[in-house]
Amino acid sequence: MGRISETVKILLIANILFFVGSQFLGDYAVKMLALWFPENANFGIWQLVTHMFMHGGISHIFFNMFALYMFGSVLEQSIGKNRFIFLYFSAGLAAAGLQILFTYLKFNPAYQNLIDAGIDPGTIYQSLGRAVQSNQYQFFPGVSQDTVMQLTDAYVTPMVGASGAIFGVLAAFAVVYPNLPLYIMFIPIPIKAKYLIGGYFLINVYSAITGATILGPSNTAYWAHIGGAVIGFITMWYWKKNQFNRWN
């Protein structure tokens, strides 16, 4: 373990402060700072950034910050502060954007099914508003329970965490140090970064497409992970290809 780089240190402190503060503010912090679906009344444009500093629990923030420390410091020392900041936040924003896109792809067809069943928009949004407050589904005659659950889950589930930005860091690390041997805990066999991080990315792609959870909780925002990783990879690949390793 080397020294913590400047930006990584600031990000670690900011994430920890947000986490501690959110424990005191509770639901209010989630309402204001988590990233809500744009159709939800709780949505605010600032949440595209603030959600990166919110986390759902001790294990969530621990693993994200551990990965940021282990890979982020080395990466920042290689590419410089300004580029690291750009990569981190662009990956986080891309993660949010892709997750929102796929949430719309779930929400819109389900919403249209309710409209086709003769349920007016006002009634639909009233039921969704109550779901935000009570976390309960309101079912309608002539509409399948799966459709209602798909619509409601898309509307009421906020996005939190730095995972998208972290995946951008991981992907960029694999571009800069593709053959660096890494170790998984309890497995004393070195695996090259490009294979370990690439394999982790493919697991997330599989989970995003199939809905099957292999690593992490069932409500993991897999598309956010993918969006962050893709931007991190493309950005670092472009820099490495065009800047002749002159990062600063």
Image (cartoon, rainbow, N blue to C red):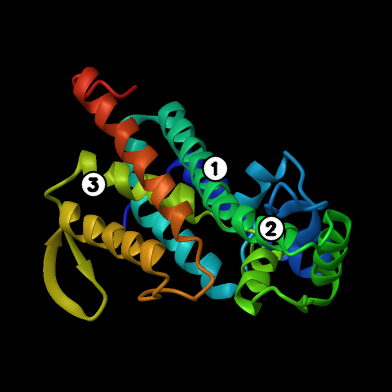
Residue 82, given in percent of the width and then of the height, sits at 46, 27
Mark drawn on residue 174: 3
Amino acid at pointer 2: Tyr
**Residue 17 visible within the image:** no
Mark 1 vs 3, N-terminal side: 1
Residue at 55% from the left image edge and 65% from the top image edge:
61
In this rendering, the answer to whether 174 lies above or below 78 is below
Read off the residue under disc 2.
111
In this rendering, the answer to whether 217 lies above or below 154 is below
Total marks placed = 3
Tell me the SS state at disc 1: helix
Frontmost residue, 122 versus 76 = 122
Query: How busy is the neighbourhood of tag 1: few (under 14 within 10 Å), some, or many (20 plus)?
Result: some
Residue at 34% from the left image edge and 51% from the top image edge:
71
Mark drawn on residue 97: 1
Q: CA distance from mark 1 to mark 3?
A: 23 Å
Residue 16, given in percent of the width and then of the height, sits at 62, 59
Q: Nearer the viewer, mark 3 or mark 2?
A: 2
Q: Nearer the viewer, mark 1 or mark 3?
A: 1
Q: Nearer the viewer, mark 2 or mark 1?
A: 2
Frontmost residue, 11 versus 235 = 235
Residue 241, given in percent of the width and then of the height, sits at 20, 24
Q: Is residue 6 left or right of residue 116?
A: left
Residue at 40% from the left image edge and 59% from the top image edge:
67
